[in-house]
Amino acid sequence: MKYIPDIRAAHNAPQQLEQLYQTASGENQAGEFAADLMACHDESPDNVLYAAWYYRLQQAAQQDQGDRRSINWKLAIPLSILTGLIFWLLFDESLLFLDHLPYLFLFWSLIAALFVIGFLTFTAKKHYRRSVLIGVGLVVAGVYVLLLAPRLLPPGHDPQYYKHYLDLMALHLPLLAWGGTGISIMGLRTPAENRFAFLRKSIEVFVTAGVYLIAGMVFAGITMGLFAALSISIPEAIARLISAGGFGLIPLLAVVSVYDPLVSPMAQEFKAGLGKIVATMMRLLLPLTLLVLVIYVLMIPFNFMAPFENRDVLIIYNVMLFAVMGLLIGATPVRADDLSPRYQIALRSGILAVATLAVLVSLYALSATVYRTALGGITINRLTIIGWDSINIGILVLLVYKQFRHGRKVWVDSLQSVFSTGAIGYVVWTIFLILAIPWLF
């Protein structure tokens, strides 16, 4: 933080800022200067001089990132082990919240997010105050659910309401934890491209976590099989340590494996490694998804009433919609010049086609939910589904509109802007559901 006062003083003096950078470089403190400049840019994103330096330093960081990145294993390993031990302690059949869900199922994401935020903050050595505030907010959210969920217990309520609320919290607290982690990294005022880069990197983290989870399950299966072959019964506590404790290692290790805390999301590596694989995989799935959507839209008239009459069909629709959103984000390039002009045209056309068909299917599903609500009244699940469908449809409609409005020249920037706005909508709706449901029902 030593350069922040001087950078602020030179907010409109290009020569003075250049001299400050050269001095820092001569003292082998260019990294600290870059971090302080980024902090000033976050404070004043409209400052043109800061913005120019922001992109200059981001480009330089990206060019040499592969050569200089080192993982802070000294901090990552102890924090991962501690997370695993907490998961192990909470994963107990006797520890059921309201006799419905284990405490771990509800709060694993908040616990993991606290350790991830701690790791990123102490490794980057900045944004301590912001990270503490986010951490406190996540803890308050967890306590809020603990205290307010019993409001939905009978008498006076449907016996299933508190179960529905807890099930929804098990799905939405991870979204809150993800949003809190992003805010701790970027702050509330950050460029759209930086927010989109965080979305793309988040997909890489989830894929990496999935790979670790599969590897862990294979290891656990082999371990259990070996002991079973010797007729040795593994104590229940050890079995929980292998399963829940092993799962607790994954969140932080997945983040550590693909994310560099020393640079902003925009300066992360996307052209090589898992980032390239994920993008390629999503783009290969795009034409297949388009084919499935075309066939499905053509088949709707022959079984039109299915979602109106069957709740399970509606659930499938909503899962499909979230999958499509993830696919579109993963297929969108971080930088337009990463792809050839010809490839850009084909990719843009595929994204537009998938988004358009997804809007049609989503409006169909939303109309079924509204119909069921008109007949049976509003419930926790119906309110949640209507909200998510409305947000996702709004994102897709805005995506299609902006693509036609702004054309091919800025199509990548337009997509990133839409998805960045959508991420804000996701976090806001998640917070609303967590806070409001106990009082509305």
Image (cartoon, rainbow, N blue to C red):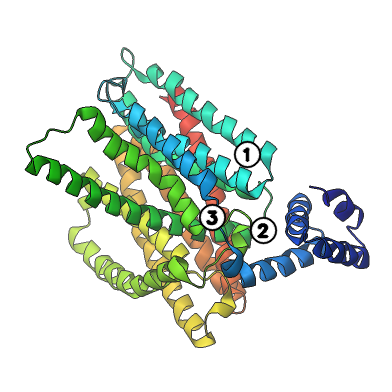
Q: Give the number of the disc on residue 131.
A: 1
Sequence-first disc among 3 and 1? 3
Where does residue 22 sit, x and y in percent of width and height?
85, 66
Instruction: Identify the residue under disc 3.
Output: 71
Where is the C terminus found, in terms of image quarters?
top left
Rendered location of residue 403, percent (x, y): 55, 71
On the image, which quarter does residue 107 sit in? top left
The type of residue carrying mark 1 is Ser
Pick the residue in front: 104 or 307. 104
Cβ atoms under marks 3 and 1 closer than 8 Å: no
Q: Which is more N-terminal, label 2 or label 1? A: 1
User: Residue 7 at what x, y percent from top left?
Assistant: 86, 55
Whether residue 334 is visible: yes
Q: Given the image, on which type of amino acid does mark 3 rest? A: Ile
Residue 191: image tag: 2
Identify the residue at image location x=50%, y=67%: 400
Of circles 3 and 2, which is in front?
A: 3
Does residue 294 lie above or below 396 as drawn?
Answer: below
- Labelled disc at residue 273: none
* Helix, strand or loop at mark 2: loop
Question: For residue 167, what is the image quadrant?
Answer: top left
Element on which disc 3 rests: loop
> Which residue appears at 46% of the width and 34% of the height?
111
Disc 3 to disc 1, how far (Cα)? Answer: 20 Å
Give the mark nearer the N terminus: 3 vs 2. 3
> Where is 176 relative to 21, above or below?
above
Q: Looking at the image, is mark 1 or mark 2 nearer the viewer?
A: 1
Query: Dot 3, how many residues are within 10 Å of its Cα: few (below 14), some (14-19), or many (20+)?
Result: some
Q: Is residue 379 visible?
A: no
Amino acid type at circle 2 is Pro
Residue 163: percent from the left, percent from the top?
30, 27
